[in-house]
Amino acid sequence: MTDRPTQVPAAVYRRRREVPVETRELPALGPGEVLVEVAYCGVCGSDLHLIDEGWGTPGDVLGHEWSGVVVESGAGVDLRPGHAVVGGPAPRCGECAACAAGRPSQCSNQPRMTGAFDGAFSTHVVRERSHVLPVPSGLDLRTAALVEPLAVALHAINRADVAPGDEVLVSGAGPIGALAAAVLVERGHRVVVVEPAASRQDLARAIGVDAVRAPADLPTFNMAEVDTIAEESFDVAVETSGKRQAMETAFQQLRRGGRLVLVGTGMEQPSFDPNRTIVLELTVRGSFVYDQDGFDVALELLAGGTLPCDVLIDRAEYGLDGVAEAVARLARGEHAGKVMIRPDLTAPGPTGPEEEPA
Ligand SMILES: [Zn+2]
Ligand SMILES: [Zn+2]
């Protein structure tokens, strides 16, 4: 293989807000492995916790929302150089009761990913063949990099048992909220988004949701108003922001039999009125990552071209040396859509709306 580099650049987490580009040795491929040149890798909300808040492990390469092209295949691999692929579901044991039941999100033996080539904030990744999925023909690599967050959003919708005709409140219009809202709009549901940031309110409108509300627009009820139902109530609320108050407010917008699904993790505990839960027969559920079918459905949906990916993906793109800046700007709310890292960009800083000629 003549195209194969021996050393590659990767953005390596060192400490809070410091993710320098370092050179890493590219290991030889073992049987059943593929070497992939990364085309795009999305910045995840979890990367914000790890990088902007400093929860990362020094030496790790982050980035799990990636697409790319196969450069080299190990023995026994069906993919050939040139094949477009995306990173598939995180590896699970495949043997525990949850895995056997088709619920790998609840695998009891989840391995921690470690090693020099973990993440895709790098020009190349080495993966087992079973951990990548071929991109359907006609689906571009930039859009394909949305597959992981879309699988997360689809799992949250599944966990909410959304039925035809259900009206849905989506709390937070970050990438997961925006993707969930887009899927629900595409499926014909009435969707209302609650979001404080103007740029993300605009994003929600561009997706075509029925209404956008600011948090202060939504009513709250005290314990004496146990069966008072909001004038604009919902069968389902999907909470993606991870903010305590947003969780509590979303809960209060449910009508009888309503379901609140929590998919945004947070650091503050919400409190839910037990009497309201009982009287209105409400359900609060968690939704963690995705189950095995999530990626296939997500790829199919992206390939179908019915989601507004041009607005779901931010126009800004950063090279590997822009990972820390991308995260900082995301944390400041300066990007509304999903931000992509493009390892082949060599110029420092972002390219995008501000830098493009008007
Ligand atoms: Zn993610
Ligand atoms: Zn398992």
Image (cartoon, grey):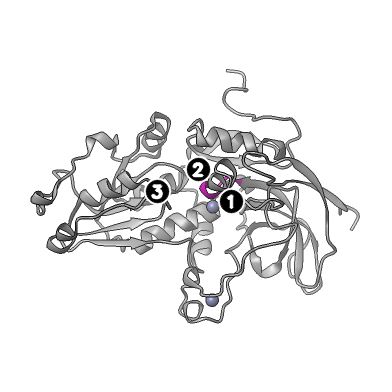
- Quarter of image, res 95: bottom right
- Can you see residue 41? yes
Answer with mark 1 or mark 3, whichever residue precedes in sequence: 1
- 168 left or right of 51 in image: left
Answer with mark 2 or mark 3, whichever residue precedes in sequence: 3
Q: Residue at x 58, y 76 (%)?
A: 93
Say which element carries label 2.
helix
User: Which numbered circle lies on residue 242?
Assistant: 3
Write the start and end of the magenta stretch as one range.
Answer: 42-46
Residue that label 1 marks:
144
In the image, what residue type sits under mark 1?
Answer: Ala
Q: Residue at x 18, y 40 (%)?
A: 219
**Position of residue 207 measured from the top left corner of the image (x, y, whole percent):** 40, 39
Say which element carries label 3.
loop
The N terminus: image quadrant = bottom right
Residue that label 2 marks:
309
Establish if 259 lies above or below 214.
below
| Quadrant location, ligand no. 2 | bottom right
Does the residue tagged 3 have its C-beta within 8 Å of any atom of ligand 1?
A: no
**Position of residue 124 measured from the top left corner of the image (x, y, whole percent):** 76, 52
Say which element carries label 1.
helix
Which of the two residues, 162 or 173, is positioned nearer the viewer here? 173
Magenta span contains residue 129: no
Q: How many angstroms separate mark 1 from mark 2 (CA)?
A: 10 Å
Which of the two residues, 258 or 303, is positioned nearer the viewer here? 258
Q: How many angstroms separate mark 2 from mark 3 (CA)?
A: 24 Å
- 112 left or right of 246 in image: right
Establish if 351 lies above or below 167.
above
- Which one is closest to the eye, mark 2 or mark 3? 3
Q: Residue at x 75, y 41 (%)?
A: 21
Answer with mark 1 or mark 2, whichever residue precedes in sequence: 1
